[in-house]
Image (spheres, coloured by chain):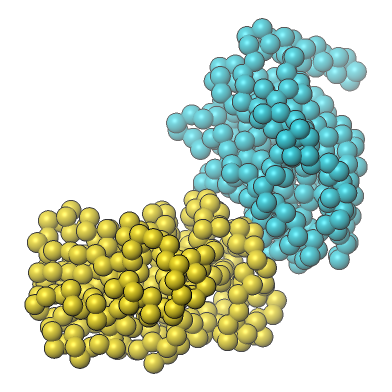
Chain colours: A cyan, B yellow
Amino acid sequence: MHTNPDYISLFLKKEVLKLIRKTKKGHLGGTFSVLDILIALFKFKKLKLSKRDFKRGVNDKIILSKGHSALAFYSVLEYFKISNYYRINDYNKPHKSLLEHPTLTKNTKELSVETGSLGQGLSIASGLSLSNIKTNKKIVCILGDGELYEGSVWESLLFISHHKLNNLLIIIDRNKLITLGNTENVNKLENLRKKFSSFNFDVKVCDGHNFRSLNKNLNEFSKKKKNSKPMILICKTTKGKGIFSWEGKNTIHHGIPSEYEFNKSIQIIESKIKKLRKKR
Amino acid sequence: MTDLRDSIFNYIIKSMEKNKDSYFLSIDQGSFGYEILKKKFPQRCINIGIAEQNAIGIASGLALENKIVFVYAISSFIYSRAYEQIKLNLCSMNLKVCIISSGPGYCYAPDGPTHYSLDDINVFNSLPNMKVYSPYDDKTCKQAISDFVNSKGPAYIRTDKGTFYQHSNSVLDVTHILKGKKNLIITHGYFVNLFAQKFDLLKQKKIGLVAINKLKPLNDSKLINILKKYKNCYFIDDSWPNASFGLYLTSLIHQRNLKTNIKIISSKEEFYKLGGKRDEIFEKLNLDTRSILSKIKN
């Protein structure tokens, strides 16, 4: 298993692309915008997300509120060998509960929460956080930016802020795209930083594909003291990151690249992997 | 006689005294019992504010950490506003959360259609893993709370307002409160209390009375054994006609090839928009006991 997160990112993108080329189904765009965030979380040593932590039941929890990116979650769980159950080649197969959205069964406890209907994960995360406010357990909830249109998210934010649930890290996958276009052309979300600050959150912004930047902010979260403001990390990302000619296009939400685009993307990924290997 | 809400809170308090890992979430809804609960468990009793969806989400998160959670809300709002969260968070993940709904049916009559809850049983009845209770005295309140605490998964307890008669033979599921000859009334919650006030008349007319506390899952076989003794049964409550629990009973009778005739007496298919107290509205809708009993012929 490679330790370089850039390598892991490229490797997993290639694996997911190979899978989707076969299945011709998946929410590729959001999967590839959130993938690096998930890798950064699993690599961050101050979060208890190892196979041993999960087995002993002492793990911190990740809630993928933007549930349609479940494939990213499964691929990371497989890569870090958290459980044998997660094999992306079993994605959507009849004998397994690895569906398009996280589904909670006795075999998929690592997913923490069942999601798929947007706007609900944060409330559940706040309940998990409330339950663990006196323990060391950390809760991370990842939301899509389009998900911020759901009113229930703002109900949660009021509660989290009021109760200072600072063992909860809220991450926004800010790729600026929903199914039918740019968020700023539908219902303007900006200035998001100011909005969250006005709700009394400690707001950070970073490049969601830069592991150094992600790590730095995760460190900030890990140092949070009691009674401090809970943290929101807005990660600037690209929908469909790494897919040839689809980066930043809203059609990659549900859309499937052509055979040429798949091949080109894999070719580009493989050459980047080669360059990384040379650097080592 | 007992105040039903006081009863429910009494048993919730007892449960929370026993289970230190339980929480009570209020959606900005108070009561006499709530004030006592809040004083006893200040850390575990939280007012979420007027946010039904958030309350169910928070309850789900707590329940995922093995807490037993009670959520207290006005009936009409909790099941409409937070239906999706109830379905996907509580039921699909089979979480131990009990919704204590205040003011079912036409309980909040003067408040108008926004506060009526005339299809909630139908809604909850269709959800896998959900248990549904409609208690009508102190015993059934106790049994409902106990049944929830001792079983897996979510529950919905309809808690009406006012003082209710006590029945010595009340059980958790189906109680044959009064035995009759040809005709049987089947009902739950507030209507049990209405008919309890007319016991002498029921006895005179030899009309039996069955009270259901645990509507879901229903003890089918017990009810069927009772139904076999009657020629006619009348399911009565204030639901909208297409949302009546009586439709489930009709299907049950048909599936089991019973000879018992069933008639459903329910509210009208409308949003009732005239004033009045609940009993006054019942008179207008022919849901008062006099109107109902006039339909039951010997």
In this picture, residue A73 sits left or right of residue A197: left
Residue at 12% x, 60% y is: B258
When asked about the image quadrant of residue A210, the answer is top right
Residue at 20% x, 78% y is: B293
Counting the numbered discs, the total is 0
Query: Going by the picture, which residue comes out furthest to the front?
Result: B274
User: Image quadrant for the C terminus of chain B?
Assistant: bottom left
In this picture, residue B69 sits left or right of residue A41: left
In the rendering, at what x and y percent does residue A36 appear?
77, 32
Residue at 21% x, 69% y is: B234
In this picture, residue B273 sits left or right of residue A274: left
Looking at the picture, tell me which residue is in the foreground, A115 or B203. Answer: B203
Q: Say whether residue A86 is visible.
A: yes
In this picture, residue A44 sits left or right of residue B268: right
User: Image quadrant for the N terminus of chain B?
Assistant: bottom left
Looking at the picture, tell me which residue is in the foreground, B12 or A224. Answer: B12
Q: Is residue A278 above or below residue B97?
A: above
In the rendering, at what x and y percent does residue B275 appear?
46, 75
Q: Say whether residue A221 is visible.
A: no
Q: Is residue B287 above or below residue A181?
A: below
Q: Is residue A105 above or below residue B232?
A: above
In the rendering, at what x and y percent does residue B67 appear?
59, 66
When asked about the image quadrant of residue B130, the answer is bottom left
Q: Is residue A141 above or below residue B4?
A: above
Residue at 67% x, 85% y is: B39
In the rendering, at what x and y percent does residue B4 appear?
45, 83
